[in-house]
Image: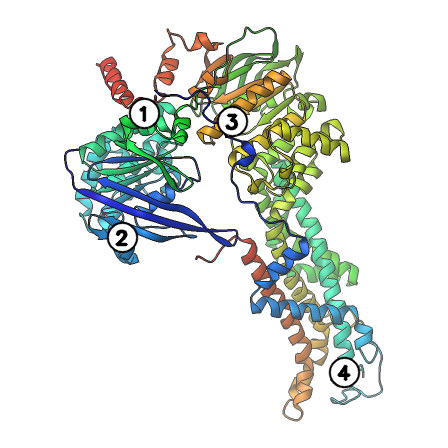
Amino acid sequence: MSTNDVLLTMRDVRIDGYSDDRWHHIINGVDITLKRGEILGLIGESGAGKSTLGLAAMGFARPGCKIVGGSIEFDGIDLLKLNHAELRNLHGSRIAYVAQSAAASFNPAHRLINQTIESTVSHGISDIETAKEDAIELYRDLQLPDPEHIGQRYPHQVSGGQLQRVMTAMAMSSRPDLIIFDEPTTALDVTTQVEVLTAMRTIVEKYNTAAIYITHDLAVVAQMADAIKVLRYGETVEDAPTRQMMANPKETYTQSLWAVRSIEKPPQPAIDTVLEINHVHASYGKSVKVLNNINIKVPRGQTLAVVGESGSGKSTTARVITGLLPPLEGNITFNGNDLPAALKNRSKKQLQSIQMIYQMADTAMNPRHTVRDIIGRPLHFYLGLTGQAQDQRIMQLLHLIELDESFLERYPSELSGGQKQRICIARALAAEPELIICDEVTSALDQIVQEGILKLLLRLQKELGITYIFITHDIATVRAIADQVVVMYQGKVVEQGGKEEIFTAPFPEYTELLLSSVPEMDPDWLTQLQQQRAAADA
Amino acid sequence: MNTPTTPHEDYSAANEVTLVKARRSVLQNVWRTLKTAPPTAWFGMVVICLYLIVALFAPLFAPHGQAQVFPMAYAPWSDEFLLGTDALGRDVYSRLIYGARNTIGIAVATTLLAFLIGGSLGLMAAISRNWLDQVLSRFVDVLMAIPSLIFALMLLSIFGSSAINLIFIIAVLDATRVFRLTRAVALNVVVMDYVEAAKLRGEGLMWIMRREILPNIMPPLVAEFGLRFCFVFLTIAALSFLGVGIQPPTADWGSMVRENAGLIQFAEYDLTAALTPMIPAAAIALLTVAVNFVVDWFLHQTSGLRDEH
């Protein structure tokens, strides 16, 4: 970063948000200084105010929020003094925004290239023909396949990773001075994430664009940013150049972000098998097979991790086990007995012994039921507990998941993400199951909360001897809690074995790709990976 | 890397910050909501309350019986007959009051029945999503393809127009619309993980309908109840006006308009005579408008749309 002139200065910015009939402070006096061509990483848990701050850098506040104090100066212009029309002129020409969910940000009815050039043309920066040529050039820079023609496709005809790159092209098309990236790779698989990160970094460097990169993933921000700012409760916790912060974090909170993967689980030998999946084939309707000859053995009292990217058949496997999707061929045995294929043929006892915990705790709990209703129902349904006995058991379960009686009458909307997931765990435990299927249970949670949940699950396993099937795409989680690992790819089991075995070379080709794509806490990791892969291709 | 050994000793799941709404009793909640109601909604609620009081206590308010015949037909407005008498010499004012009871009572019963039929079938169709859904949905399509007023006229002339038949026929015809709405909103809820979780638990259809889905689709259904009530009310009035609705001597507003419609031509001699058929018509209109005001406000409340600050 040779140039020293400052592009964006935010001084003592304060933002209030309106909820539950009053105003709350969301951002409490944060300063940002960004030079031309510099990338600043904003990191923090959900609710820390990252996105609000990112939008404020554009002079924008969401409906229900207002900027109440401080100053925001972009290249000598005071953004807070501009009116709507002037701000709109600036957005999409000199400041651009890349949102988390590319799929939700594109209009499904228009071709990609027309959407890419839309703002450039409407701002009068260039005419349609030049803009189109330029867009193709950007597609090439972003390593999109077939850059000349991909723009003719509609959003649903390209993959999630490609769509995110097209969105970056859209943001770049006016050659802005500043781009805000709001968690652009959070929704992507690790293998895709690497490609998108590489492409974004290359293009931002090429055009010397300044950027604010918002994420909760420290390893990702380490690859992208020149400096990192850690936010918590709308305040700056720590602020330092990337390398300095990675090497020597000062604040306890920052250190805790670094240390999240401190869980270690010594692998144990498998004794006997609780559930066995034999030669299972499955499909939705008459379409292509989603599962192709799956054989999995689940060891009793241990954790089997099922790993793979989206579309690999992980969740379908769970649906087959639970009976929601009867397999076309093959069978499942539970404790040595055949498990009926369809849900409606299973006995109450069989239903009780296999429980499920979902990825999105928000949608897994009825918003109109209180915690008491949610945990009490399986107690009543399976064990026939009512009144006092039921209440006592609910209290025991709440203590088991480290919550207390003040939660009894709360509705799901009054719980934090981690608390919701804990209530879901309690609901599964209430049935006193032998096997719990955990479908990406931590992937929607912040790092610290994730660790809390994983520790809880491990403790419960030790105390109650429950077996877990843990579906995830996060390799770090697998390392932390698994005994056995199954790697899936395109509906097939690529590899199965003990954790040590799977994570020691030599790897099958896909496992290698998956493992090498997991970002590491090393600012040079992406550069090195790029070089390695380039060398391998050559 | 500088890694402390126990990084989150102070971390506790119970202490994570969330917004917990203050606990209030149902009554407090209702009062809080009412305080923010706009004047139109207040107007609507007051009018509806007045109608209900009149309907419930009709014998106390009415000076004469609804079928009581006096020997003077077409009596003008006077102290004894506030709004005069009709062709048979019955007191129009008393019939107006009894009409509230009959017309509103039948409309409420019909709407409730329509929701019971349409709502439960719609929920079943949404949950099952199989042949049952197909059969019910196509049957509803067929029913809706026939203009409902003509269909109702036909059915009433086949089965005879008693109050019971009237309620059943209009309820079934209106249930088609309730079915469609219930099915559409329930479909959004059925795909939620908590419904899947209930299925995995082994819960029966009734539980899933009543406890998992119904509470989550209540707001649009309540709003639809208000609107449906208006339409049912108008349908009954229209059928009575056509002579196949509520049968004499039972008083109702639709047939009162028809019976006294001829008086309009005497407007140039006596304005009050011309007003006589207008008053039951105005009673119908006022109630419909009032219900709509309340429904509008309710929809705005539950839609989650907030005024931007």
Report which residue position mark 1 lands on: A248
Q: Are marks 4 and 2 on the same chain?
A: no
Tag on residue B86?
Answer: 4
Image location (x, y in percent) of residue B93: 75, 80
CB within 8 Å, label 4 to label 2 = no
Look at the image and tell me in which quarter the N terminus of chain A lies.
top left
**Relative to B53, A53 lies left or right:** left
Image location (x, y in percent) of residue A295: 53, 12
Q: Are marks 1 and 3 on the same chain?
A: yes
Report which residue position mark 2 lands on: A79
Image location (x, y in percent) of residue A376: 69, 34
Name the amino acid type tagged 3.
Gly
The kind of secondary structure element at disc 1 is loop
The kind of secondary structure element at disc 3 is helix
**Camera-side residue of A34 and A179:** A34
- How far, Cα to Cα, is label 4 from label 1? 97 Å
- How far, Cα to Cα, is label 2 from label 3? 41 Å
Q: Earlier in the sequence, mark 1 or mark 3?
A: 1
Name the amino acid type tagged 2.
Leu
Image location (x, y in percent) of residue B279: 67, 79
Q: Is residue A359 visible?
A: yes
Report which residue position mark 3 lands on: A452
